[in-house]
């Protein structure tokens, strides 16, 4: 109690001013004379004018709440857009796969890529079908974009495929336009090369390259890629033909294993010929 009295005495001027203001407000509220009504009207008009004049100043707390709501809505719509985009891409990819099914007069099995290596000299992919599904070594692997590679190892439920970007990969190929043929190899980098193409043969940038009838493993006519560059070295008999693969291996998710084995006698004979 003593402390309260000390505080009242210390700030008595402020408490007195507050008391007088309260008394004035009570008197103004209870007084209904013409002058008081005029003051009230002017006060209300002034307050309204000030609110209108400074109404453009945003309320911080309302803006913060509105911003949080908009951010949550944006996140929800972003997730929905991502799902719709993924569904559209999946639909387009499946439509391409169905078109490939109509083009290929061969039996095949669809497989998902469950593993891949793309930064080695002997790059491979692993697919989720194997011997239980009838997959065997040397069966071709393709996608809707073109040639992927061939099966080199099988297990019960999985198989390993050797892709174009592999130092040991070989395939007979030809240009669709001029019918010039050669051997497809990979020496590293983003391109594959068509070897044994004489300097005098007709090769142009943009030519489509497909598998040829000379291949003992791959069916003829499967797209490999497009000629991206040609060059000739002085004194060389052959020109250098670089090909951009039509398959984007970094995005490869689904493939077809062609259920066709090469003729064993022809394959054995080809393997006996020195390269």
Image (spheres, rainbow, N blue to C red):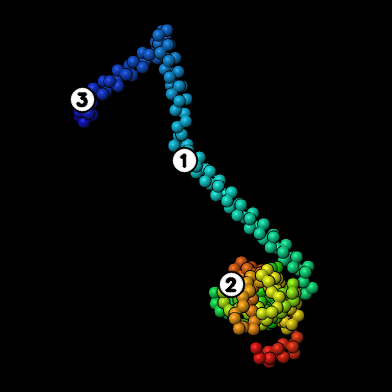
Taking depth in this image into account, of 111 and 200 the one nearest to the observer is: 200
Distance between mark 2 and mark 1 Cα atoms: 51 Å
Position above or below: 166 against 269:
above
Callouts 2 and 1 close, C-beta under 8 Å: no
Position above or below: 227 against 65:
below
Mark 2 lies on residue: 190
Q: Residue 202 location, x and y as percent? A: 71, 75
Q: What residue is rendered at 77% in x and 69% in y?
A: 103
Q: Is residue 65 left or right of residue 13?
A: right
Q: Residue 142 location, x and y as percent? A: 69, 73
- Residue 89's disc number: none
**Between tags 3 and 2, which lies in front?**
2
Q: Circle 1 — which element?
A: helix
Q: Circle 2 — which element?
A: loop
Q: What residue is rendered at 61% in x and 83% in y?
A: 236
Q: Is residue 130 left or right of residue 122?
A: right
């Amino acid at each position: 109690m003593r402390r309260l009295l000390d505080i009242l005495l210390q700030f008595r001027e402020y408490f007195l001013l507050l008391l007088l203001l309260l008394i004035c407000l009570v008197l103004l509220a209870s007084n209904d004379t013409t002058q008081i009504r005029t003051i009230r009207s002017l006060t209300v008009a002034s307050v309204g004018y000030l609110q209108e004049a400074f109404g453009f100043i945003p309320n911080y707390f309302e803006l913060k709440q509105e911003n949080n709501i908009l951010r949550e809505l944006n996140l929800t719509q972003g997730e929905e857009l991502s799902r719709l985009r993924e569904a559209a891409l999946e639909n387009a990819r499946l439509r391409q796969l169905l078109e490939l099914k109509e083009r290929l007069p061969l039996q095949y099995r669809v497989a998902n890529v469950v593993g891949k290596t793309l930064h080695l000299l002997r790059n491979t992919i692993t697919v989720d079908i194997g011997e239980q599904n009838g997959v065997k070594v040397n069966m071709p692997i393709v996608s809707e974009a073109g040639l992927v590679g061939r099966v080199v190892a099988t297990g019960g439920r999985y198989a390993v495929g050797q892709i174009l970007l592999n130092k040991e990969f070989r395939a007979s190929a030809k240009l669709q336009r001029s019918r010039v043929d050669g051997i497809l190899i990979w020496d590293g980098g983003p391109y594959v090369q068509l070897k044994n193409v004489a300097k005098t043969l007709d090769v142009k940038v943009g030519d489509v390259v497909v598998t040829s009838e000379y291949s003992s493993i791959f069916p003829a006519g499967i797209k490999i890629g497009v000629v991206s560059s040609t060059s000739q070295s002085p004194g060389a008999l052959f020109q250098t033909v670089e090909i951009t693969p039509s398959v984007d291996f970094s995005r490869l998710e689904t493939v077809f294993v062609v259920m066709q084995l090469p003729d064993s006698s022809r394959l054995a004979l080809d393997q006996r010929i020195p390269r």
